[in-house]
Image (cartoon, rainbow, N blue to C red):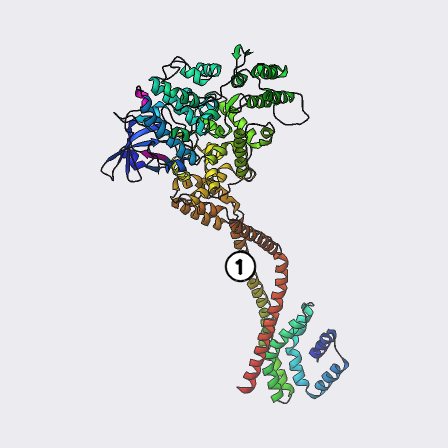
Amino acid sequence: MTSVRQAEPGTLRAPGFRWWHGIIIGLLLSYVPGSLLVAGVLLLPLVLLKLVDPNADGQRIMIVLFYVGAAMVHPLHEAWAANGDWDTCIAQITQPVTLALDWLAAGAAWLVAEASAIGGRLWNAEVARRERKSIEKRIAYLQNEWMSSDDDAPAT
Amino acid sequence: MADTQADNSQELLIAERYLISLDRKQPDFGGCATYAAQDVMASGASYLALAPLAASSRLTEIMFFRHESVIPIQAHEYNQGALWLLCPHPPGPSLAEGLGLWTESQLIDGVIRPLASLLQRLEAAKLTCRSIRPDNLFVAPGLHKVVLGPLGAAAPGEKQPVLFEPLSSAVCRPSARGEGTTGCDIFSLGVLILSLAIGKLPLEGLSDNDILKRRFEVGTPAAYMDGQNVPVGLRSVLTAMLSDDPVSRPSPRDLVTIAPSKVFTVRPAMPAGIPLVIGGNSVYTPQALAWYAGRHPAEFSALLQRKVVSNWLSREVELSAMAGLIEQASASFLPTGGGKAVDPATMVITHAISVLDPAAPMFWGGAWFWPEALPQMLVQATIQPSAPDDERTIRNILSFMAANPDAFMSAHLPQRQSRQISALSVEARRIGLRGAELVRRLPYDLNRFLPCLSKKCLEARISLPEGLLQWLNGHVGIEDLPDEALGRSGFLDDQMRSFLEANCARQGVIPLSQSQKAGLPGWLADLTLLAAVQRKFAKAPLSFLAQRALPLLETELRQWRSRTSRSRRRVRLGKAAEEGNLGTFLATVNDPTGLRLDQRQAQQAEAEISNLMRVLDEAPERRAANDREARNSGEFFSLLTGIAVAMASIWLEFCQ
């Protein structure tokens, strides 16, 4: 329950939160509280990310969501298979492997995003360096060809 | 060239046929240096090789002229650009070695008739001989028949002694005598006949000036014949031939048909009763007055102004027409409004002298001369100046006369003089130059046999442009032409330049004008001229010349901005220099199309450089943009992998 309440203010801050979101969550809470608990617990990294990094935009949230979603597939499937049985759900969220996977997924999302950004930056820097080098080479060639005298290099 | 000179410098084989022995110099023949020569083809037939320094401008016609009384020019050949004339040996010794005493019939058959028929033929060909003098006449031993040395090998009349020249050319210096007329030849013939008849030269032992003085005093026939034992039958013909008035001399036709004791009538000159005294000399005839007027111009103009001359003419000489003309001439002493740059006093004396003696040569600027002889005078003054500023004086006269023919036309000169002046001015206009350049060009344009008068190559007697090119090719070494001289004055000196330009003009090549030359360095203008000459005349390569010009032209290559095209052209220059073709050599540098293309490309390159510089300057801004882009693409990539991971997880969960 606390996790749900904790999740709600997290979602409350998100823009575009509508009244029917509350109705859906209410319905889910009354119908499949176990599954919702699993989902809520597993979505905690997302909430934490939102709290820690207020600048994280929708895109970043979306990326983390996909990774976390990948980790959530198995526990939710288990919860679903147990028909939302509360004990099973508790067992799921207390399983350290699942939790670790979940947090690792969030971390992996962050890592992949940053790493690929850095990689892209490095790649761009390399491209720019090469371009610059070729431009400088071209300038040197043109200057040598068109703006030098022969005095320094007499004919053989 | 180097081979033959190194092997035997004393022998010269020209035209692969005539072997000239330079060490066997013969007495001058036809007025120029003569050497023994052999025809190696015709089993050593012996010839005389003449090396003319200033051949007559009409040598072409003269070379084809044949007459039994003149030694023919059998062949003419050029060797290294120098003209050689080959003549057979004369039949015997010249008359200068011994005149002998000839009888009247010997003279008529052996001298008068043959030479008169020669003069008749020459007259028909519009040529003159002007070389009847003892050392140019040869007699076969035992025969009494004279043969004249080859014509045209020397400038007309130049070698004639004063004794053998009529007054109309004797007063001039030798080079100023001009072509003369057949009348002049008749006079020379007369002197020859007289000398042969009396066995010695008349007035022997007198100086030229004394001879002239005596002839002006009493008239030439009297001066030469008085007191001499002249055969009676010849007295009349000699009086006519030696007459100072050319009109009175018999024509060649009269002499060809001469019979012994034929009588010729001469209008007697009427000396004045009372002489006119000028410069301390008593003058009896207008001709003599004209001559003394030239010697004492100041005194003569004073006499003119005081009307002494006109009064003397009308009262004592009874030539009232002449007196009237003189009166008119002296009237122009009064200052005239015209701003002509002619010294009126000099022009008045010129005019007065031409009135006094219509047959006299022109007197102007203190010299007696025939206008047509001016180029030859200039040549003579350049080769061998008799006075320090001789050349300058003649230059001034020639330049003024060629530029202002009107000044002389208005002076009513005798016809022969004004014809020669107008011929000169026509030639000057055809050449189209002015001033000193025109004066230098005129002799070359008027005489194609004139060798290049440059002091450097005068000895080589080069009268062909290709010969001069070859000579230059052999004389462009650093010792002949130091670098600073080359940079300052180019490859040629003024005379060579005029010589080549005249030859080019003859082939229809118009050389660069002075103003065009002003924009070029001297050596480049010279090279252009040399290239034109090479294209027109000489196919032989001029590699030494080109090699010498190579460093100079290489500096010209700086105009090209492209380094590669510079080096490519440098290689091409080197190759062209080795081939010795000046045309391609110059074209490598003087290539306006290529230069324009080069400049356009250089501008493009400059634009490109500034463009690239700008691109480099913008790099930081672009890096920021790139960073943003990298972040975006990183996120995009991680989103894609997230989707893939999620899909893989679902697949593992449900389908495995």
Q: Is residue B185 magenta?
A: no
Q: Which quadrant of the rendered structure holds the N terminus of chain B?
A: top left
Q: Quadrant of residue A31?
A: bottom right
Q: Nearer the viewer, residue B523 or B516?
A: B516
Whether residue B36 is visible to the viewer of this picture, yes or no, is yes
**Is residue B402 left or right of B12 when viewed as pictured?**
right
Residue located at (60% from left, 20% from top): B320
Residue located at (44% from left, 47% from top): B584
Q: Quadrant of residue A107?
A: bottom right
Q: Relative to B22, say whether B207 is above or below.
A: above
Identify the magenta region: B83-102
- Residue B443: image x %, image y %? 47, 32
Instruction: Say how many tags the image has.
Output: 1
Q: Nearer the viewer, residue B74 or B77?
A: B74
Name the chain letter of the residue that bears numbered label 1.
A
Whether residue B28 is visible to the viewer of this picture, yes or no, is no
Name the residue beneath numbered marker 1. Answer: A130
Q: Relative to B623, say whether B184 is above or below.
A: above
Residue located at (70% from left, 79% from top): A4
Classify mark 1: residues with Cα within 10 Å, few (<14), some (14-19) or many (20+): few
Residue located at (56% from left, 86% from top): B654
